Structure formats: C-alpha cells, structure tokens
Image: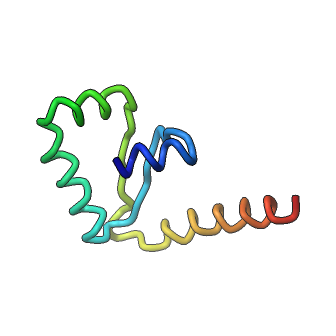
C-alpha cells in the first residue's frame, strides 16, 4: 500500500536507487517475502520497478543524488 500511495502522488518510478542502509535492505526482504501473495505479485509485476543500491565502498554516490534533488527543489521553488 505504501508503494501504491507513493506512485499515486509522484508517479510510478522505473528505477529506485537507495543506499545500503539496513532499513532499505529489510524493506526489500519484506517485499520479496510478501511476493508470494497473489495481490502483491500482480501489483509488482505490472509496475516493473527496478531497485538498485549504491556501492558499499562508494559512500559519495549518495551525495550525488542529494545534490540533484536539491537543485530540482531550488528551481521549483523559484518557479
């Protein structure tokens, strides 16, 4: 339901990129575990979302995405 709310507000993402935090890893495990339920399986198959993680030995990757978000927010704020 959380993914459905997120997609309704911001659109369906093709690619989700996150850091290697334990909470993101646990969320992926929970999604994979609940994938056996028919309702969840049909929803995830229609969305076709890819989930990737930053490299463990490259912590600077996260700052790159944060800079991009900051620049977009600044431009939207000026509009």
Left or right placement of residue 15 versus residue 45 in this view: right
Left or right of residue 67, residue 48 in this image:
left
x 39%, y 38%: residue:
49
Q: Nearer the viewer, residue 36 or 63?
A: 36
Q: Is residue 46 above or below residue 76?
A: above
Give the colour scheme of this rendering. Answer: rainbow
Q: In the rendered image of this protein, does residue 34 appear above or below residue 64?
A: above
Estimate the x, y position of residue 12 in percent, counting from the top left: 50, 39
> How far from the left and from the top, in percent, is residue 66?
58, 68
Using the image as rendered, state which of residue 69 and residue 27 is in the foreground.
Answer: 27
Residue appearing at x 36%, y 57% in the figure: 53
| Res. 43 image quadrant | top left
- Front residue of 18/46: it is 46
The answer to whether residue 39 is above or below residue 52 is: above
Q: Is residue 7 left or right of residue 34?
A: right
Q: Identify the residue at horizontal 55%, vertical 71% (top origin).
A: 63
- Estimate the x, y position of residue 5 in percent, counting from the top left: 45, 48
Which sits in the foreground, 15 or 79?
79
Quarter-wise, where is residue 68 in the image? bottom right
Percent coordinates x, y for residue 24 in the rendering: 30, 63
Q: How many marks?
A: 0
Question: For residue 44, which quarter of the picture?
Answer: top left
Which residue in the rendered view is the most extreme toward the right?
A: 79
User: Going 25% across and 58% down the picture, which residue do you hit?
Assistant: 27
Name the quadrant of the C terminus.
bottom right
């Amino acid at each position: 339901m959380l993914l459905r709310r997120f997609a309704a507000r911001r659109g369906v993402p093709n690619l989700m990129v996150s850091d290697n935090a334990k909470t993101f890893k646990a969320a992926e495990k929970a999604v994979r575990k609940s994938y056996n339920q028919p309702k969840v399986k049909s929803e995830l198959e229609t969305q076709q979302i890819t989930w990737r993680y930053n490299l463990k030995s490259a912590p600077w990757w996260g700052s790159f995405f944060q800079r991009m978000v900051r620049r977009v927010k600044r431009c939207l704020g000026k509009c």
